[in-house]
Image (cartoon, grey):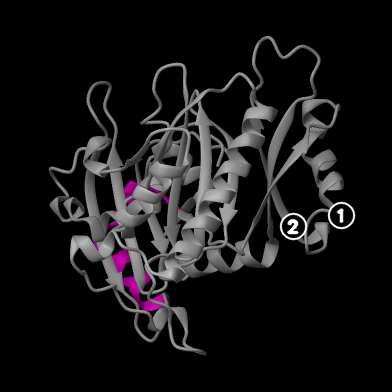
Amino acid sequence: MNSFGRFNNGGQRLAICIAEDGLCALSVRRSVVGKPLVTLAMFQALEKGAPEAALEKFGKQLRTRKYRCTTLLAQGQYQLLSVDAPIVPPEEMKEAVRWRLKDMIDFPVDQATIDMVDVPLAKAAGVRNQTLFAVAAQNSIIEQRQMLFSKAKIALTVIDIPDMAQRNISTLLEPEGRGLAMLSFNADGGLLTVTYGGELYLSRRIDVSLTQLLNSQPAPGAMKSEVRDIELVSEEAQLTPTDAQLNCFDKITLELQRSLDHCDRQFHFIVVSKLVLAPIHAPALQAHLAANMYMPVEMLNLADVVDLVDAPSLLTLQQQQRFFLCLGAALRQEGSAS
C-alpha cells in the first residue's frame, strides 16, 4: 500500500473517511465527457464512538475488493510543510527531504512516513529554487490506520490528506488560466487552498471550527462528538451575525488576506480569480467575506461539479458538507500524488 504515494492500478475508486459521528463512503466514476458521476454515497453512524464496527459493516456491504480504496488522515495526524527542493539526484530526493525535515516536524524524523508533492514553477521563473510540499506522519499513525482497515478486510490503496482532497475538487472549478481559492470548514477547523493548473500551491489551516463558525459552541468540557447539528433559523437571523461570529469572521478574513497576499508574492504568475466556499449553511459568512475581500466570493453546490443522479441524498446542503472531503478523496486521479 502507498502512504501518500503514487499508484496506477485499475478499478473504481472508493473513499472511506472517518468523521467524529460516523463513516462516509463515496465512489466516483469518471468519463471522457461530462461531469464525474457519484455512483455511491453512504453514511454509517459510529457505535460508542469507535469506527471498527462501522468499518466492518462497510466492508461487508460494499464488496470493497472491486474498488481501489482510499482514506484520509485528520488534522493533527500529519504535517504538510513547504520546503526548498534539495539539489540531489531524484533517487536521493526523499532521503534528502527527510533530513531537511528533522528540525521542522514535532516528532523524531526516523519515526516518520514521508512523501512529497511538487510545486510547479512558471516557465519564466528563471533560476529560482524549486519548492515542494512534504507530507509527514508518524509511522504509528499510518500503521494504526492500516490495521483498522485490515481488520475490516478492506485493502487500502492509499492514505491521503484533506489538503489534496480539497485540491481535487478545486481543480474542477478553475477558470482557464486562472487560480482558485477554496475555503472549507469542519470540526477540525478551516482549510484554505489555492490551486492553479490542477496543482496545489498553497494550503493554510484556519483555527476556527465549524461549531465556532455557526456560533453553537459546546458546553465547557464537552467532547466534539457531543455537538449536534445546528438548528436552522430564519434567513434574517442568519444574516445578522452575533458578536462571537463576527470575531470569527474577522479572524477568517485576516487569515485569508494574509495567505492570499503571501501566495501572490510567492507565485506572482497566479491570478486568483475567486474564493469558493465549500458547502456550509453560513450566509452571514459569505456576505462578510464578499464585503471585505477583493475578489468574488461564491458558495459551492457539488451538483455543479459532479453528477448526483445516482446519489440524490447529496443534493441537500447538510449532506454536501458531510461528504465534501470524502468526495475530494474519491476524485483522486491515476498517477497523482496525495
Q: Is residue 197 above or below residue 78?
A: above
Q: Position of residue 100 (x, y in %)?
A: 85, 44
Which residue shows up at 65% across the image and 11% down it?
Answer: 123
Circle 2 residue = 112
Q: Position of residue 187 (x, y in %)?
A: 45, 67
What is the crowding at mark 1: few (fewer than 14 residues within 10 Å), some, or many (at least 20)? Answer: few
SS type, badge 2? strand
Q: Is residue 77 above or below residue 97?
A: below
* Residue 34 shows in the view: yes
Question: Which span of residues is magenta-colored?
Answer: 52-70
Q: Is residue 152 above or below residue 84?
A: below
Dot 1 and dot 2 residues touching (CB under 8 Å): no
Residue type at mark 2 is Ala
Looking at the image, tell me whether mark 1 or mark 2 is earlier in sequence order: 1
Q: Which label is found at residue 215?
A: none
Circle 1 residue = 103
Which residue shows up at 43% across the image and 78% down it?
Answer: 217
Along the line of sight, the residue nearer the viewer: 105 or 139: 105
Residue type at mark 1 is Asp
* Residue 64 shows in the view: no
